[in-house]
Amino acid sequence: MMSRPPLRHTLYLILLALYTINAAADPVDFELPGLDGKTHRLSDYRGKWVLVNYWATWCPPCREELPELEVFYNNHKDSDAIVIGVAMENIKLERLQKFVDNQFLSFPILVTEPAARTELGGIPGLPTSFLIDPDGEVVARQVGPVTAEDVEQFIENHKK
């Protein structure tokens, strides 16, 4: 019987397999309201790697992944990368804010209605993360949880 590779190794391989480069691709963009009351645009973060994570408070894998996203965000927010969480559910903003506060999340949290497709691509399940390079192009999509280490390795291996 063959042994299975560790989950983080499998997730990294999935990210790697989904990596695509299209030199002629137009940068992606979206505009969504944040819990902070401001409108956030993906293009506001050009020049940095951006991990856009679609999630919901009712989703157990999403909740398990949030501490990893917070670690990645805190390790990179002042230098080369950022995390944007997009709460994809019908929820009162006060309830969402309380959840975010209880989870000690400091990365920007945006809100949107549930949808099967976004400006970045399809959302077959939650959590779904998209990695956007500093030029604004989607370079990877992960359906399922990611770790800070997975994202850091992917970025390191794909810096231009």
Image: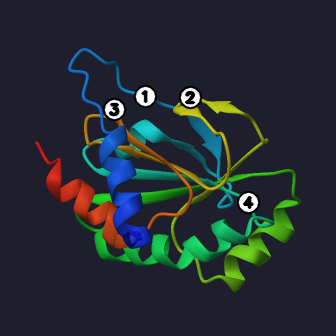
Q: Quadrant of residue 101?
A: bottom right
Residue with the mark numbered 2: 119
Q: Which residue is at the far top?
A: 24
Assign the C terminus to one quadrant of the image.
top left
Residue with the mark numbered 1: 28
For the residues labelled 2 and 4, say whether their Cβ atoms are less than 8 Å apart: no
Compared with 75, 93 (above or below) is: above
Q: Position of residue 93 (x, y in %)?
A: 82, 61
Q: Position of residue 136 (x, y in %)?
A: 33, 34
**Amino acid at dot 2:** Glu
Tell me if mark 1 has few (under 14), some (14-19) or many (20+) residues whose alpha carbon lies within 10 angstroms of its own: some
Cα–Cα span, label 2 and label 1: 7 Å
**Amino acid at dot 3:** Glu
Residue 39 is left or right of residue 112, and the answer is left
Residue with the mark numbered 3: 137
Residue 99 is left or right of residue 81, and the answer is right
Residue 77 visible, this angle: no
Earlier along the polypeptide chain: callout 3 or callout 2? 2
Residue with the mark numbered 4: 56
Tag 3 secondary structure? loop
Earlier along the polypeptide chain: callout 2 or callout 1? 1
Assign the N terminus to one quadrant of the image.
bottom left
